[in-house]
Image (cartoon, rainbow, N blue to C red):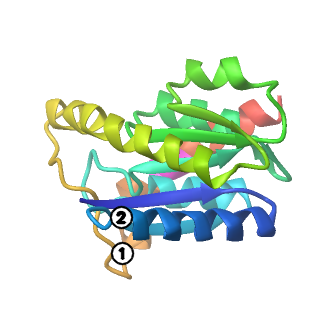
Amino acid sequence: MFYRIAILDDDADALRRMEEMFSAYGAAHPEHDWETACFTHAEPFMESVCRTEHEGEWAFDMLLMDIYLPDGDGMECARTLRRNGYDGVIIFQSSSAEHAVEAYEVDAVQYLIKPVSQERLFAAVDRAVEELPRYRKKRCKKGTEEQPVQSTGNTNFEKKQTFRFFIDTLWTKWNSRRNG
């Protein structure tokens, strides 16, 4: 099965460690094919997650998100995505347990405390992979295809007026909540 994963963390070292651990997970689980995309800021993360080729699909099957970011709040990103229909798996990672209860309010499958060990990440990804069929069933019930979005390199993102409106609306809602 092919999975697209977005990792959001403002710490470049943490991003590198996560990519290395996902690579190790992939080596240990050859039945899964992974593609990861890393982000250090909320704005490009939100734009990329919302990027889609087909109506009703999201660009990533799984999100691994930090809470504390220089330009936003990972928890608020997750709330905004869920309110707007994001139906993929969310895993949080944070240096604090402060938002752990909130994480489950946005249907996160796991809340990891940094530094995240390989063992804990593997357990979280195992659980996420188990949960993905449930999320994909929701997607199918909405009338969309079960297949994850494939990367084509050029998504014609700027040409899709309806989608651009959706992104602008989503981003405006997120910013207004973030700025009070």
Badge number at residue 42: none
Q: Nearer the viewer, residue 38 or 126?
A: 126
Q: How many marks?
A: 2
Q: Nearer the viewer, mark 2 or mark 1?
A: 1
Residue at x-position 56% and y-position 33%: 110
Three-letter code, disc 1 = Asn
Tag 2 secondary structure: loop
Towards the viewer: 32 or 55? 32
Rounded to the nearest whole Å, what is the CA distance between mark 2 and mark 1?
A: 7 Å
Question: From the viewer's perspective, is residue 113 above or below residue 62?
Answer: above
Say if mark 2 contacts mark 1, CB within 8 Å.
yes
Residue 168 belongs to the span the image colors magenta: yes
Question: In the rendered view of the protein, which quadrant contains the C terminus?
Answer: top right
Q: Which residue is mark 1?
A: 156
The amino acid pointed to by label 2 is: Lys
Note whether 64 is above or below 37 in the view shown: above
Which portion, as a residue range, is magenta? 165-169
Query: In the orientation shown, which residue stands out farthest toward the bottom?
Result: 153
User: Residue sitting at 41 percent across and 55 percent down?
Assistant: 60
Residue at 60% from the left image edge and 58% from the top image edge: 7
Q: Residues within 10 Å of mark 2 (few under 14, many from 20)?
A: few
| Relative image position of residue 100 (x, y in whole percent) | 70, 24
On the image, the x and y values in percent for residue 80 come to 57, 34
Instruction: Check the image and report above or below for 79 versus 5.
Output: above
- Residue positioned 59% across, 36% down in the render: 78
On the image, numbered disc 2 is attached to which residue?
160
Question: Is 118 on the left-hand or right-hand side of 97?
Answer: left
